[in-house]
Image (cartoon, coloured by chain):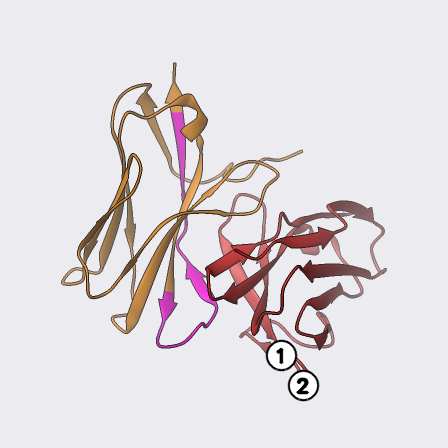
Chain colours: A orange, B red
Amino acid sequence: GESVGLHLPTLSVQEGDNSIINCAYSNSASDYFIWYKQESGKGPQFIIDIRSNMDKRQGQRVTVLLNKTVKHLSLQIAATQPGDSAVYFCAENRGTGRRALTFGSGTRLQVQP
Amino acid sequence: SAVISQKPSRDICQRGTSLTIQCQVDSQVTMMFWYRQQPGQSLTLIATANQGSEATYESGFVIDKFPISRPNLTFSTLTVSNMSPEDSSIYLCSVSGADGYTFGSGTRLTVV
């Protein structure tokens, strides 16, 4: 069957390199942002999140950067591994409360061994 | 975080028929959402499922086509009615709780 992300922009990296995936958002009222990883046949999996009162947050091998001035979000993956191959989506929560997320268009990451 | 069981995981349906997708959560959650993911696309919100009242639909989605039930705080259903091939997509349930947002594994629907 057709896999997720077949028509999405693709980022190809070599195993061991660092990956940077970018996302632009449109609503300046958004106050909470999440990066998700989606593998074929699965639902989105949480990677890392950041609130609008921060500009950087680090996790295990991942870093999210938020630039509110230009409404830009990036996900950095250090020492990319073949298991990181998937489609990555940014999502934003527009406004207060636990409202539904609005998803970006997504990027397919391919890790070459 | 909440664990979601979504059924069926996939189905192939004839045009003109309807399919009901179930979403069961292992804990009570306030907010439940239904998304559609068309082939090669991102996730688009269909509606917010409200417990005890009618769902709140996003622009472009209507109750007659996508009726939603939410009888309690752990369960919801989405029905895709009078299906056409354009309804072929992955449909995902999501919840928002104290631990953040969680997604089901999705229902891959193919309409022939």
Residue B89 in the image: x percent, y percent? Answer: 65, 50
Residue where numbered disc 2 is placed: B53
Magenta-drawn segment: A93-110
Asked if residue B42 is positioned above or below residue B99 in the image, the reply reads above
- Left or right of B110? Residue A57 is left
Residue A3 in the image: x percent, y percent? Answer: 58, 35
* Frontmost residue, A29 versus B5: B5
State if disc 1 and disc 2 touch (CB < 8 Å): yes
- Residue B67: which quarter of the image? bottom right
- Residue A83: which quarter of the image? top left
At a point 82% along the width and 55% down the height, the residue shown is: B15
Which residue is farthest left?
A: A69
Answer yes or no: are tags 2 and 1 on the same subunit.
Answer: yes
- Secondary structure of the residue carrying tag 2 is loop
Specify whether residue A102 is painted magenta. yes
Chain name for mark 1 = B
Chain name for mark 2 = B
Asked if residue A98 is positioned above or below residue A102 in the image, the reply reads below
Residue A50 in the image: x percent, y percent? Answer: 28, 57
For badge 2, the amino acid type reads Ser
At a point 72% along the width and 65% down the height, the residue shown is: B78
The answer to whether residue B112 is seen in the rendering is no
Residue where numbered disc 1 is placed: B50
At a point 19% along the width and 60% down the height, the residue shown is: A54
- Secondary structure of the residue carrying tag 1 is loop
Residue B105 in the image: x percent, y percent? Answer: 62, 47
Q: CA distance from mark 2 to mark 1?
A: 6 Å
For badge 1, the amino acid type reads Asn
Specify whether residue B13 is painted magenta. no
Q: Residues within 10 Å of mark 2 (few under 14, many from 20)?
A: few
